[in-house]
Amino acid sequence: MGVAVNRNRLKPSEGDGGKPPLAAARLTIDEHLPAFVEARQHYLDALPIGAAVIGIGPQGRFVECSNAVFKQLNEPLSARSRRADSLLDRNGLGERIVEFLISGDAHSDFEWQDGDAIAGRHFSVRLARLAETHISGARCMLTLLDRTAELQTAQNLRREMLSDSLTGLPNRAGFAELLEQTSTDPEQHFAVLIVDLVRFSRINECIGPMAGDELIITVARRLVHALRAGDRLARIGGDEFGVLVRLVEGPGDALHVAKRVQEVLSAPFRLTDLEIKVECSIGCALMNDGVADSEKLVRHAQFALKRAKETGKTEIYQPTAFNMARKRFSLETELRRAVEGNRLHLAFQPLIDLSNDRVAGFEALARWQDDEHGEISPTDFIPVAEESGLIVPLGRWALEAAAHTLAEWDVRAGRPLPVKISVNLSAIQLARDDVASVVSTALDGAGIAGSRFTLELTESAVIADPERAVRVLDALKELDTSIAVDDFGTGYSSLAYLQRLPLDILKIDRSFITGMLEDKNKVAIVRAILSLADALGLKTTAEGVESIELSRTLAALGCAMGQGFHYSGPLDSDAAYSYLLARNA
Ligand code: C2E
Ligand code: MG
Ligand code: MG
């Protein structure tokens, strides 16, 4: 609510040369009413907080301060009368008071700092208008509430919240704030590096948490040395450091700093009687023009870090890699729906006996026809299924669907057909699922003999966990199924395993068959595989037979079976059945 003010009274009086009120001749009220002033001084002194009555009127300005004000402002009490109105000269306070007195407002509250940023004190100031008198002119009561301690506590708390107690560096929140502040300056270009210590949790377990802490502190100290002036370091996780790199020359600066980081960490760390080698992975994201979203920047750097852990090199975030991951993620969601909604189907590719050119069996291959994306290749969705664990339900489905199709063909033919069906097993499936009992259930459910089934697995399935592989394959043999090694020659089978495992067939990878007729080396490899198979008592199937010449050569070399577009690509169930009848007629 406004209070009427006689503005004329605030004008400089004649004879003071038109100076503003604060510089006006200093004539204090106590010359006129000493007893009244003294009484008022007593009231002021009795108040529990610093208070002052301030007036600016026709007779100049006057200030009466309580003792508490002197204490709060750290002024010696003896100088009181001399310094009372110096209150108005402190850090803009006088101007705020004049502004208020002119405004006509009833009161005004503001924060005010007395002194510099380091040693200064903070006050909540309240100005409350007092009634005007003829002598005083416009007046107000000022009260000072010292909030220095409160503010310092808040600042300390904030500092604590934003810093890592072990290293004293900014923590994750502190780093975010640092980035936030930096990204508001359009002139500056920055990159974010995330440095992750490789296997730190293992090291920590071995050396104990105390030594682990010491190691982190030493790493932090070395990292600080790797940085240039203006770069900033933070500890953003247990074994993760964030670096804000100033780009002066260009993006190359970020890689330069990354290299320095690798260098300073390369020398072993000596902790009491231990010598520890610490390796790190580094992911980097560049703040490009216009993109000043610091949270995004950290996310991008983290994504690059993930890649760096795979590749073993410092990686810079690239949007395409990110989009690929996103695509993969949405593929996973859709694949999950397709598996659950039973929207996959099997295609069947004939396996031809090269000695008589008849169909000896079919390989069942998963197909995904998606409404939106059309036909999606198994080379795209099988890896997604493996990574997400969906391969387990998918693999079970494939086994059951294949068994049912074979049973259905038998019913159509009115007798058990002399063909086998091959189903692919993924290494992940072998590791996670109870494959033998799943196969057994599928066979029983369809009423098919185990001898009609071949399971194809890649070399990697065996290498991952040989003990388990032996157990599972033995159990599958108990069911009388055959076992084929798929894509043979591309993995790292050791001959010892080949001998130890109950295998029946080696499927020679397509890469050796394609172009074999024009490449002596390939012929040599195929010959070698064939004689190895012979020595181990295994049959062979050549993948990717695309021409009659190939089929003849392979037959001549002693390969038992062929699979490929020369005979037929994968067919749907009905077409496969017709193909079988026609070819074996
Ligand atoms: P794979 O088991 O080696 O299957 C043979 C692949 O070679 C099939 O590709 C087939 O269409 C293709 N192919 C056959 N003959 C020829 C030929 O003459 N020329 C060429 N260029 N290609 C030929 P597809 O169907 O795309 O399957 C790719 C891979 O996906 C399979 O390789 C297999 O590893 C995997 N896969 C397919 N279905 C399943 C499944 O149900 N479970 C598992 N775990 N993996 C599956
Ligand atoms: Mg296969
Ligand atoms: Mg294959």
Image: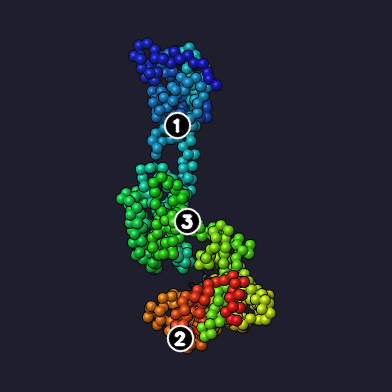
Residue in view at x 41 percent, y 78 percent:
516
> Which residue bears the numbered disc 1?
112
The residue depicted at 59 percent of the width and 70 percent of the height is 572
Residue 92, percent from left and from top: 40, 28
Q: Amino acid at mark 1?
A: Trp
Q: Give SS at disc 1.
A: strand
Q: Earlier in the sequence, mark 3 or mark 1?
A: 1
Callout 3, which amino acid? Answer: Asn
How many angstroms separate mark 2 from mark 1 (CA)?
98 Å
**Does 330 appear above or below 452?**
above
Establish if 400 lies above or below 164. Answer: below
Q: Relative to 201, is 566 above or below?
A: below
Residue at left offset 53%, top offset 67%: 378
Q: Please tell me whether mark 3 sits on a helix, a strand or a loop.
A: helix
Residue that numbered label 3 is attached to: 323
Instruction: Give the crowd class for mark 2: few <14, some 14-19, many >=20 residues within 10 Å.
Output: few
Q: Position of residue 204 (x, y in %)?
A: 46, 65
Is label 2 in a helix, a strand or a loop? helix
Residue 214 visible? The answer is no
The yes-or-no answer for disc 1 within 8 Å of ligand 1 is no
Q: Who comes first in sequence, dot 3 or dot 2? A: 3
When the figure is inspected, residue 489 is found, relative to residue 221, above or below; the finding is below
Which mark is drawn over residue 556?
Answer: 2
Q: Is mark 3 within 8 Å of ligand 1?
A: no
Q: Nearer the viewer, mark 3 or mark 2?
A: 2
Cβ of disc 2 within 8 Å of ligand 1? no
Along the viewing direction, whichever of 266 and 508 lies nearer the viewer: 508
